[in-house]
Image (spheres, rainbow, N blue to C red):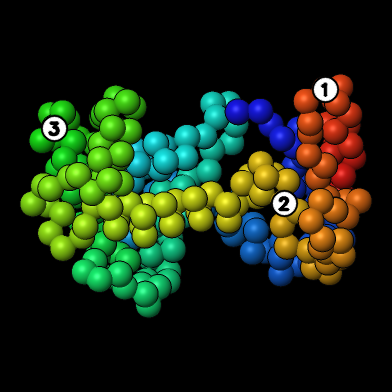
Amino acid sequence: MTNRFPGYDVLSKREGMSWNDPTRQAIDERISVKDEPLFFTIQEYRILQALCDRILPQAEGEVKIPLAAHVDRHLQINGASGTRYEPMPYDGDAWKIGLAALDAEARENYGVPFYDLWPENADALLTRCQNGELDNAAWQNVPPALFFKRRILAEIPSAFYAQPAGWSEIGFGGPASPRGYVRMQADRRDPWEAAEAYPGDGGRTAKINAKIR
């Protein structure tokens, strides 16, 4: 994938006027989450890690966001969101049943745990999950398509785009307190925001972003 914002790193704003102390503390807490389970069992966590790797693969050689850890912490700290999608149970129970069911489907269809699937087999299984084509008894009262839509696609991308690395990828400046955003109209940006690179600009945007603070 082409980097739309080359040279841009939102963390370069950390000590500038864009962020105040509470913002710095909140961001520091997010990026210091350890890649280990508190809510899930070790087995569930391994399945979740493999699932995150298929939903949002992260480039080799870059700092990897521990997406499974952030989903885990959200459930461990916040519990259920208060919204339940009938007939699926609340968040934590739905996740545990769904992960166990994906693992059961992998073992039934391919003879290995979900986290040992070849990437193409994992993707094929997840496509069937999205289409509601899985029927292992392990799903219990969690419809596969609903689990894919309301848990997998809702929470794994949310974990990624709550992180500074995710913000840098899309050119988002993150919280702006006390500086604030001024130019809110479409196709306009404040001078300190990231400029999107366009093909043929000769690296000009990378030089601009490298100066942004």
Decide if residue 129 is on the left or right side of residue 164: left
**Residue 50, numbered label:** none
x, y percent for residue 146: 29, 58
**Residue 109, numbered label:** 3
The residue sitting at the left extreme is 137
Please tell me whether residue 206 is drawn above or below residue 97 in the rendered image. Answer: above
Q: In this rendering, which labeled residue sits more in front, label 1 or label 2? A: 1
Label 3 element class: helix
x, y percent for residue 29: 59, 59
Q: Amino acid at mark 3?
A: Asn
Answer with the quarter of the image where residue 165 lies.
Answer: top right
Q: Amino acid at mark 2?
A: Phe
Comes first in the chain, label 3 or label 2:
3
Answer with the quarter of the image where residue 126 lies.
Answer: top left
**Pointer 2: what residue?**
172
Badge 2 crowding class, 10 Å Cα cut-off, few under 14, some 14 to 19, many 20 or more, is some
Decide if residue 100 is on the left or right side of residue 186: left
Q: CA distance from mark 1 to mark 2?
A: 23 Å
- Residue beneath the point at 86% across and 26% down: 201
Comes first in the chain, label 1 or label 2:
2
**Residue 200, numbered label:** 1
